[in-house]
Amino acid sequence: MPYPPEHKRRTRARIVAAASRLFRRRGFGATSVDALMGAAGLTRGGFYAHFRSKAELLEAALAAAFEESRQNLLARGLEDSRGEAWLTRAASRYLGPDHLRALDEGCAVPALGAEVSRSGDGPRRAFERELTRLIDGLATRLGGPHARARSLRALSTWVGALTLARAVHDPAFAEEILASARHAQASDHSPLDGASDGSSAAASSRGQSSSSPSG
């Protein structure tokens, strides 16, 4: 007797949830199909009933991980916060000790960005789509002039600081890195030079990049 459609949807969701956590904690390349199916409480044989490849699963796992990022930065106690007050609170959360330690529940950008850049067009498109949604959400919550440019700069600063802090061995050094980024965030209220909040500027920049010869 075949399983009902809802069973297949629930099973797929279990695989995606397990992959989202394991890919962030161990890395995409270091996580085998056996390991992620075991984490989902399933056997390897069922994997290809849901995904054609591990790269396809990565796309779904990225969507799940970025949804957690949106919840962490825009909800879970920050729903009513706006503007500079929200940005300060979001920076403290992103650059705090809990996020430093929570690799499997943390932001997908520092955890998987480098691997995604080497993982083919599908994962890169998925990453770009989810990153755009995240930036749009941050810009809407920040509001004001140059909100998109400031949100891009803020997230870039947070990601860089968190990546460095996770890479060092000395906890005091890690906290120094995070504290420096928090301080920079608190003192930075200026737009990027020449920045525009319009999506047309970003599209134009992408077009110029694609037409330029590669080095």
Image (tube, rainbow, N blue to C red):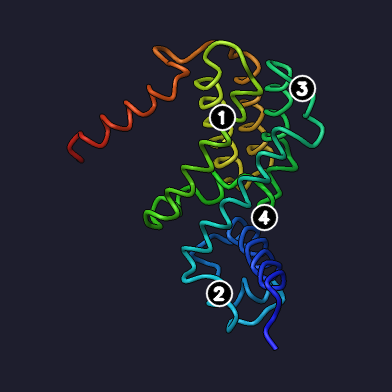
Viewer-nearest residue: 169 or 146: 146
Of badges 4 and 2, nearer the viewer stands: 2
Give the foreground label among 3 and 4: 3
Query: Mark 4 = which residue?
Result: 104
Q: Which residue is mark 3?
A: 81
SS class of the residue under badge 4?
helix
For the residues marked 3 and 4, what is the alpha-carbon distance in whole angstroms?
26 Å
Q: CA distance from mark 2 to mark 1?
A: 33 Å
Q: Earlier in the sequence, mark 1 or mark 4?
A: 4
Please identify the quarter of the rendering in which residue 175 is found: top right
Q: Where's the C terminus, which quadrant?
A: top left
Secondary structure category for the residue under label 2 = helix
The picture places residue 119, in percent across and down from the top left corner, at 40, 57
Task: Identify the mark nearer the N-term, 4 or 2.
Answer: 2
Disc sitting over residue 33 in the figure: 2
Looking at the rendered structure, the kind of residue marked 4 is Asp
Judged left or right of residue 105, residue 147 is: left
